[in-house]
Amino acid sequence: MTLAMSGQTVSIPKHIAIIMDGNGRWAKQRLQPRFMGHRAGVKAVEGIVKHCAQRGVEVLSLFAFSSENWRRPGKEVSLLMELFSHALKNQVKKLHDNNIKLQIIGDIDRFSESLQQQIYLAQQLTKDNTGLTLNIAANYGGRWDITQSVQQLARQVAAGTLDADAISEELINAHLSTASLPEPDLFIRTGGEERVSNFLLWQMAYTEFYFTDVLWPEFDAGQLDRAINSFTHRERRFGRTSEQLQDKPDA
Ligand code: IPE
Ligand code: IPE
Ligand code: MG
């Protein structure tokens, strides 16, 4: 999707990937338990999903639970699982009514049987929707994703159906959990930390990064527009020169 800005045509990001960070600190500022921050974080998700759909973003990837988040206190982990299950129960119909396709990426085998079943049903229900793809990363790690892709290929090599020399970037990409999605154009991390925390490592090789101190529960449509606006002012060269992009290759 494109829009006109100061005479130039600039593109809205097709795929936005977000690390929703700062829930705990938001709660702490209010002298509340961390869990209240996660609850407020779910509310913020609703607003951002709606705004992305309205602005014509095609894919929104949200990091909900990392493969490292199991290291948190058991009580917080189980509350996060409950919250995830609760949010699925309450939101799936609404997502479906809005033509949103829900996809979960990550190693979901570690979740309870009932949560796995909920995930399966939600994906089944919304799989043919043609609006925004909402891609939730749960028990996700970028290194896990690359590893599981390579394992699939290694099995094919062992079975004699794939030549090791035929393993290419395209083939590794095609076996990642995001195989059906375009690569993220814009990566946003709220909460002030400036790191990737094992999110979409392979997929973000050429993604534009945007960091904000705003804590996730306070990240709203206006904040998202700021990030998108920053994105539209960037020159994505993908290794080329600025002149090449302006169609003056010899300048
Ligand atoms: C992000 O917020 C949510 C999850 C990791 C589930 P945090 O819980 O990391 O919040 P802070 O970083 O402690 O403020
Ligand atoms: C990253 O946030 C994962 C999610 C937002 C789900 P963390 O707050 O757990 O990241 P680190 O471990 O501090 O880098
Ligand atoms: Mg954090």
Image (cartoon, rainbow, N blue to C red):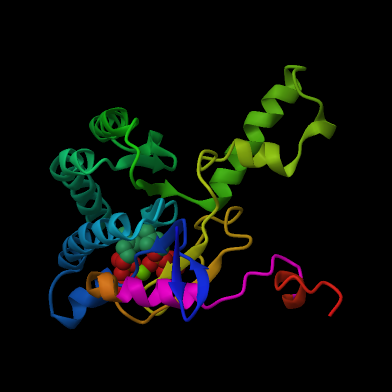
Q: Give the percent coordinates (x, y) of residue 190.
A: 37, 73
In screen coordinates, is 32 left or right of 76?
Answer: left
Q: Name the residue nearer the viewer: 130 or 249.
A: 249
Report the number of numbered marks: 0
The quadrant of the rendered image in which ligand 3 is seen is bottom left
Q: Name the residue nearer the viewer: 12 or 105.
A: 12
Position of 203 relative to 31 (above/below):
above
Position of 56 relative to 97 (above/below):
below
Residue 30 figure quarter: bottom left
Position of 232 relative to 69 (above/below):
below
Q: Name the residue nearer the viewer: 43 or 66.
A: 43
Q: Give the percent coordinates (x, y) of residue 37.
A: 20, 68
Residue 205 figure quarter: bottom right
Residue 195 appears in the picture as rendered: no
Residue sitting farthest toward the front: 7
Residue 213 appears in the picture as rendered: yes
Q: Provide the residue span drawn in magenta.
A: 223-241
Q: Name the residue nearer the viewer: 107 or 247.
A: 247
**Is residue 234 inside the magenta stretch?**
yes
Q: Give the percent coordinates (x, y) of residue 161.
A: 74, 18
The residue drawn where x is 44% and y is 51% is 67
Position of 57 relative to 91 (above/below):
below
In screen coordinates, is 48 left or right of 8?
Answer: left
In screen coordinates, is 117 left or right of 185?
Answer: left
**Is residue 235 inside the magenta stretch?**
yes
Q: Give the percent coordinates (x, y) of residue 141.
A: 49, 51
Q: Quadrant of the N terminus?
A: bottom left
Q: Quadrant of the C terminus?
A: bottom right
The residue drawn where x is 75% and y is 70% is 247
